[in-house]
Image: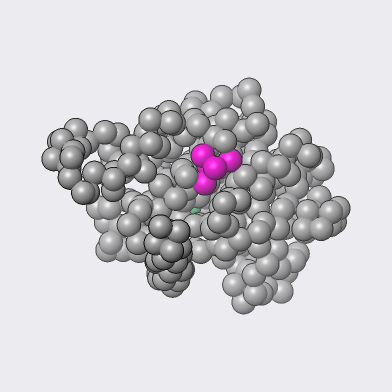
Amino acid sequence: MIKKCLFPAAGYGTRFLPATKVIPKEMLPIVDKPLIQYGVEEAMDAGIREIAIVTGRGKRALEDHFDINYELEAQLRGTSKESMLAGIRSIINTCSFSYTRQTEMKGLGHAVLTGETLIGHEDPFAIVLADDLCFNGDHGVLAQMAEVHARHGCTVVAVEEVPLSEIHKYGVIAGEEIEPGVYRVDAMVEKPAAEVAPSNLAVIGRYIITPDIFDILRETTPGAGGEIQLTDALLQQAKQGRVIAYKFEGRRFDCGSVEGFVQATNFMYHEKMDGADRRKNLR
Ligand code: UTP
């Protein structure tokens, strides 16, 4: 059972400037919910109740979102709009939230190491990159990964097949398929050129990781882009046969890019409308 989920959310979100100059990327809404809330709901769907968020300067809206707004609640009490806050209120009542700040943005690996103080060394934990929005109805991607982790007892990364023309944007794995859609990873490369990519299986923003990763990250030197790369640390675990890649069921949208953000908005809008129609028909 995975208890904690870490959300590295300190990045600058430069692909979305100027929208992200003041508003954290993770607070950009897909239809009517900010990206980070989708991620937290996916973690809850996997049974997780302890949420740890690595923030940075200018990211206080994240903390305010997962807190009570007494004035707003008092205004809406007894009105038809009260139900619109029910979802976020239930999240606040169910989960605990803790925060730490990454003071220098030295990459995802560094952000994860910054979260060590919130996660500790006792148990495997999940990581969600909220700008990757995943959708799979009632059986979320993190819940699927928790099942794979329960079977194999080691680190699990979610992978997706991507066209080779896109592969240079991702961490890429190679490994032997040991069950349908499940691979024992033996190589991992961050942002390879298409000609040298070890496969077309790209790591997306969902991980379940054993806590020895923190000691590995402490020893990891800057890699691609001069940043401390989580992929490089995971490669050390993979060399010991301790990383599984899992081809998840569902859709994933790269909401850190404008194109993925628009696709996710259209998809979620139709999901919401279809759900509303279904509910109407049940009445
Ligand atoms: P990204 O590279 O997608 O995010 O990092 P970014 O740097 O915010 O976006 P662009 O590329 O400038 O548009 C993946 C995840 O890692 C976090 C980001 O917040 C995002 O969730 N991250 C990245 C950190 O928390 N700290 C860092 O130093 C770098």
Taking depth in this image into account, of 113 and 49 the one nearest to the observer is 49
Q: Is residue 172 magenta?
A: no
Query: Where 271 falls versus 244 (above or below)?
Result: below
Q: Position of residue 236 (x, y in %)?
A: 73, 42
Can residue 74 be seen here? The reply is yes
Q: Residue at 35% across / 61% down in the picture? A: 31
Q: Is residue 43 magenta?
A: yes
Q: Residue furthest front?
A: 283
In this rendering, position of residue 190 left or right of residue 49: right
Query: Where 48 falls versus 164 (above or below)?
Result: above
Can residue 234 be seen here? The reply is no
In this rendering, position of residue 121 left or right of residue 28: right
Taking depth in this image into account, of 33 and 277 the one nearest to the observer is 277
Query: Where 195 falls versus 70 (above or below)?
Result: below
Q: Quadrant of the C terminus?
A: bottom left
Q: Position of residue 207 (x, y in %)?
A: 62, 45
Taking depth in this image into account, of 261 and 240 the one nearest to the observer is 261
In magenta, the rendered stretch is 42-46
